Amino acid sequence: MTTPFLQIRGLRKTYDQVVAIDQVSLDIKQGEFMTFLGPSGSGKSTTLYIVAGFQEPTEGQVLLNGKSLLDVAPNKRNIGMVFQRYTLFPHLTVGENVAFPLRVRRRPESEVKAKVAKMLELVHLAEYRDRLPGQLSGGQQQRVAIARALAYDPPLLLMDEPLSALDKKLREEIQFELRRIHQETGVTILYVTHDQEEALRLSDRIAVFSQGRIEQVGTGEELYEHPSSRFVAGFIGNSNFLPVKVEQMGGGRARAIFPNGQAVEGDARAFAAGSEGTLMVRPEKMRIRPHAASARGLAVTVRDMTYLGDSMHFAVQTPWEQELAVRMAVGDGQGLCIGSSAVLEWDAQHGHVFA
Amino acid sequence: MLLDYDRLGGWRWGLVAIGSAVMLFLLLPIVFIAALSFGDSQWLVFPPPGWTTQWYQQLLTDPVWVNALLTSAKVAVMVTLLSVVLGLLAALGLARSRFFGKSALQAFFLTPMVLPVVVLAVALYAFFLKLGLTGTLTGFVIGHLIIALPFSIITIGNSLQSFDSALEDAAMICGAGPLEVKWRVTLPAIRLGLFAAAIFSFLISWDEVVLSIFMASPTLQTLPVLIWSTLRQDLTPVIASASTLLVAFTVLLMLLASFLKKGSRQ
């Protein structure tokens, strides 16, 4: 087996008594777009800063092509980085900002000129070469920052919430640009964000961080369809969490009991029989039937219904007075009105039981 | 606002009158001095019976005045350089690190601003007498530097505060070593603060008189000291022309400073 491009091995970082990250391990393939997703303080930025060299881990190792990165000073790591705030040098023009890493590397003038032109072409800002950063919009500044970070063809590009300061429309525009730049350059990207939609939109794979550890690593689809924990399920996409008591386990399935005594099945990891758990079902995986057509479903009362154009949103109440969200195609909910009794159904494979 | 200038009505003329009176009170002496320096009356008669530039010629040919002018310039330039360099180092240290006693040190650096200059002057005089520094260029430079440094530290510290240190991280990851980061990114970014510190330091040294009187010797004195001592002996229009030069140069530097300030706001 070949060595992975970037290996993060058992990273641990503590400040005084506080553990920032612990047991963070991850392999990243060359050319991969890997996103660290998690709430603030979950350790995703700390991990990125250790790779960049701004922080040193208490324990663990980072290997690029099998060689340790930790022994290399940050300015010798040859890594590109785009920061959360706009970090263009205010006294230099756009062109000189992009040229900066090349000038520091004492590259010949002709090469610098050609490379700057090429990079500004890549981010579609060629005509802004002689402007100062202060004359650019936030989105344009971040695009220049991307051009600067890629000017020296780094094998690895780190991005620390680069779009969080931009408004939604601009954010989506630059997300699109980023995908294109990733495809055109083939650079390996480590991307940090707390925005699950952004993570799904951009990444090949996502590592979900929580409380200093990686909860789960996988493609967006894997994380959405097969979350390994309640945290991942709650962080990515919308979800309903129903309280259950696990009755028996077998073949990756759990048989569980709702508070009203009704039995239910769902995917589950190892579980001790008799323990309390949570059943997670996505709103769009649920169906509401008007009357007791099937005895297998959960009896509910429709509390609210909202027309959303492409779908209908329902709020329903369980017998133990918990409110659940259900989303169905427009037309599938005919015959339902607010206050009516109904039956809630879902396929067993769409139910996930967590501790 | 309640006291909006536009809503004052007739009262605004009263306000204009008070403002003008204060301004005249502040400016007239300077105008008088400037006018007298070009007047041809030996006895500083006002209004001058005729006009002449002979006092300026006298000023610029008398070796005593020329020497004082040169001494003033030499001291001011050296104070400026040292004040900016030391001020930058102190401001960097205070802005970028956390250590025990930092705020105490910060306050200590600023004490020359609140200490009465004459107290400082007496103390330095006694100390420098022992070291043999009175009446030397070094003595002048050290004395002026003590008064100028707090202004440098404050000015440069302020511009460092508005400087985002993430820029240094960005420069470093771009491949620049620690010194190259400071030289290529930090210093250019705070250059307006450095200029302002330089101008302040120069001006403080240029018209400092209290410390200088203590430091001066009959052979080595700055322009303000010479004006002061000449004034006590005889009244000559040369003093007026020296004062006018002093003021003119100060005004020039103040204009430069406000010009820089305007530039930084863009």
Image (cartoon, rainbow, N blue to C red):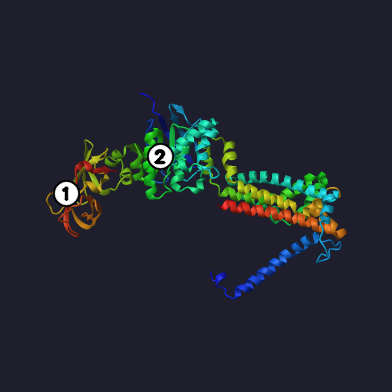
List the residue tagged with mark 1: A297
First-in-chain label (2 vs 1): 2
Badge 2 marks a residue whose secondary structure is strand
Q: Nearer the viewer, residue A261 or B5?
A: B5
State whether residue B104 appears in this view.
Answer: no
Q: Distance from label 2 to label 1 (Cα)?
A: 42 Å
How many C-alpha atoms fall within 10 Å of the one at disc 1: few (<14), some, or many (≥20)?
some
- Which residue is most to the right? B233
| Relative side of A197 to A324, left or right | right
- Which residue is most to the bottom? B10
Q: Where is residue A251 drawn, in percent x and y?
A: 21, 35
- Which residue is most to the left? A293
Badge 1 marks a residue whose secondary structure is loop
Q: Where is residue A280 drawn, in percent x and y?
A: 26, 46
Q: Which chain letter matches label 2?
A: A
How many C-alpha atoms fall within 10 Å of the one at disc 2: few (<14), some, or many (≥20)?
many
> Which residue type does callout 2 highlight?
Tyr
Q: Where is residue A269 drawn, in percent x and y?
A: 27, 38
Q: Which chain letter matches label 1?
A: A
Q: Nearer the viewer, residue A265 or A343?
A: A343
> Which residue type does callout 1 highlight?
Gly
| Relative side of B55 to A103, left or right | right
- Residue A191 is tagged as 2
Which corner quadrant of the image does residue B24 belong to? bottom right
State whether residue A78 appears in this view.
Answer: yes
